[in-house]
């Protein structure tokens, strides 16, 4: 995979920490590399839906934002990434202590990057794949104001 520009880890941490909704969920950046991003979330009762499983919205947010992190590793200075399209398959009910998401760029592009995310749930030391998402991430030029 060709890396267009090395986005510093500090910038990816800023992206994760500056997104109020993502930060409020407790999603944290773990690993970053060219076209790859991994995050974790310690599951708490606030993440549950009515039957005690991790809410689909939590999984979708984690998969989407981690996909954006993976795409952001391949952009140039003066660019940002925004989700253009997103699809998730919820494969099984998620119940456990921790969620882990790994996102990988499948096809980088100048205007659109395609990323795949897998969300795994850890319970009693065993991880199971609970959801899989595909995101189309737009690469947007940021113009200075003035």
Image: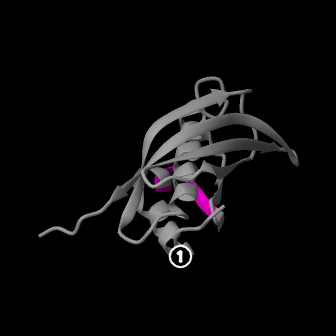
Left-right relation of 85 to 142: right
Q: Position of residue 29 (x, y in %)?
A: 60, 62
Instruction: Work out whether 49 lies above or below 11.
Output: above
Question: Which portion, as a residue range, is magenta?
Answer: 23-29
Left-right relation of 141 to 67: left
Disc 1 is placed on an element classified as: loop
Q: Is residue 66 magenta?
A: no
Which residue, given by chain and number where applicable, does mark 1 sit on? 8
Q: Nearest the camera: 109 or 77?
A: 109
Q: Picture quarter containing residue 69?
A: bottom right
Q: Position of residue 97 (x, y in %)?
A: 74, 46
Residue at 57 percent of width and 54 percent of height: 27
Instruction: Work out whether 9 lies above or below 80.
Output: below
Task: Please state the total of marks drawn on the protein image.
Answer: 1
Q: Position of residue 74 (x, y in %)?
A: 54, 63
Specify the color scheme. one colour
């Amino acid at each position: 995979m060709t890396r267009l520009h090395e986005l510093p880890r500090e910038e990816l941490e800023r992206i994760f920490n500056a997104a109020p909704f993502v930060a409020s969920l407790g999603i944290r950046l773990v690993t970053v590399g060219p076209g790859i991003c991994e995050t974790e979330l310690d599951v708490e009762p606030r993440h549950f839906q009515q039957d005690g499983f991790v809410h689909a919205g939590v999984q979708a947010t984690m998969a989407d934002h981690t996909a954006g992190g993976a795409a952001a590793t391949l952009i140039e200075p003066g660019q940002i990434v925004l989700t253009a399209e997103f699809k998730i398959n919820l494969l099984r009910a998620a119940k456990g202590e921790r969620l882990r998401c790994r996102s990988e760029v499948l096809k980088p592009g100048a205007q659109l990057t395609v990323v795949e995310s897998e969300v795994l749930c850890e319970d009693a030391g065993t991880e199971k794949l609970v959801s899989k998402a595909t995101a189309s991430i737009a690469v947007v030029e940021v113009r200075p104001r003035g």
